[in-house]
Image (cartoon, grey):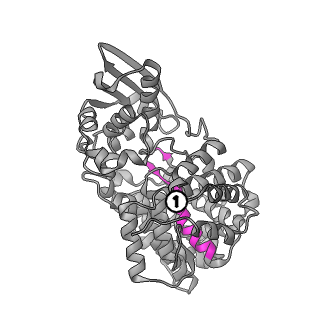
Amino acid sequence: MPIVHDLANFVDTATYDDLSDEAKKQLKVRVLDSLGCAIGALDGGPIRALREHLADFGGAEHATLVGGGRTAPDRAALYNSALVRYLDYNDSYLAEGETGHPSDNLGSVLAATEYAGGSGEDLLTALAVAYQVQCRLSDEAPVRAKGFDHTVQGQYAAAAGAAKALGLDPEQIANAIAISGTAHNALRVTRTGEISNWKGLAYPETGFTATHSAFLAMRGITGPPEVFEGNKGFKHSIAGDFALDWSEEDLERVTGTIIKKYNAEIHSQATLEGALELKRTHGIDPSTIDEIEVDTFDVAFHIIGGGEEGDKTIVRRKEEADHSLHYMTAVALLDDQVLPAQYEQDRIEAGDVQSLLRKVHVTENPQYSDRFPDHMVCDVRIHADGQVYEMHKEDYEGFHTKPMTWDTVSEKFARLAEPYTDAALRQDLIDAVQELETFPAGDLFDLLSRVQTPEM
């Protein structure tokens, strides 16, 4: 039997009862966290462009857009996934050779659940499937070193989640995954060198095409059954050989994903927490800083520290700022926080942060690299006023060793949603997600439609 059919059987037989109580809890935490990120992104420039794009092109009104309006499910997946992703504040999963953001799949699952008239329990089960598929493929079949983007694993995950939410049969699920995995293999150049708007839109595009693939399979369109192991398939062309027995998989990988404390690239989180702890403990005045040294693990060094993915002292726009450890560390020390406001264009261009970021020096510590991804080890040393202040970190609040509580995530949600909701709607959304397994999914979509979208 082709591997894609083994995967399809796993997707088909997954049930809400298969989830542990902890996995159910963590799924709801991540839905709330993701919806906060989505609502907080409503006024982003690329989001406005997408909204104009959807308004111009139209689409059958089967699925709700966060902030009001309806469109075709694949386009809703594109837009709502873009909202979740745009701030770069949503969750992450760390594997040895891959880092992804499994909550990127929420837009696809929301759209397919609404189209199918599914329940909150159906939504959570489909989302758990998407998390499991993306995380396990990231573990066993990383593609970053081969020059491909982590959205490649997402094509399988989002298609699996959408197919599950639609209630497709095993043959249709296999075809949805095969179509999506064959047709859409993205390049890592999205996140190297000069970073463009596409950094925040690459996975939303994955959500769009994967959801579209699931609907094609629903109509009876078939895909290559040997997408994984066939001649010129995923293993042969991209990932290399790997073994993954889907009959042995559970739905628990969500418990190993991590939540961002700061609105910053995931590998920066421990560094930023350490830098802010040093500032607050010792009362460091940023204007007296002569140098900031960061020793970190290889993935952080190469992606955000000036390693193989480009010079991170050149920061001209949001997409470069939130992938520059130099900028994020500097702005954290100057502003005592890293939130969406730290990525406004005027803040990025300001002289104080542009000067301080050039005093940040990042190096890789091979011993710290050996401990990744189980730990996020770094040292932060701040040279200021003739003194050297040092902090060693191994994790941060939100890492899987220090899970973020429901109350803390609720506060994050409320802070992000405040500009676009009143207090009553925020509380209704928090309550709806907390009781999502019994809450009517249709009522959740109604709440999301009542969020206020900024005027064009």
Does 199 appear above or below 230?
above
Residue 153 picture location, percent across and down: 47, 60
User: What secondary structure predominates along the stretch shown in magenta?
Assistant: helix
Which stretch did the figure color magenta?
94-114
Which of 295 and 110 lies nearest the eye of the viewer? 110
Identify which residue is drawn at 37% across, 44% down: 342
Identify which residue is drawn at 49% across, 76% down: 74
Residue 397 picture location, percent across and down: 55, 36
Residue 355 picture location, percent across and down: 23, 34
For residue 63, what is the image quadrant?
Answer: bottom right
112 drawn magenta: yes
Residue 292 picture location, percent across and down: 31, 26
Q: Amino acid at mark 1?
A: Tyr
Determine the secondary structure under disc 1: helix
Residue under circle 1?
420
175 drawn magenta: no
Identify which residue is drawn at 45% across, 49% down: 99
Which of 329 and 282 lies nearest the eye of the viewer? 282
Quadrant where the N terminus is found in the figure: bottom right
For residue 367, what is the image quadrant?
Answer: top left
Q: Position of 295 compared to 443: left or right?
A: left
Q: Position of 74 compared to 299: left or right?
A: right
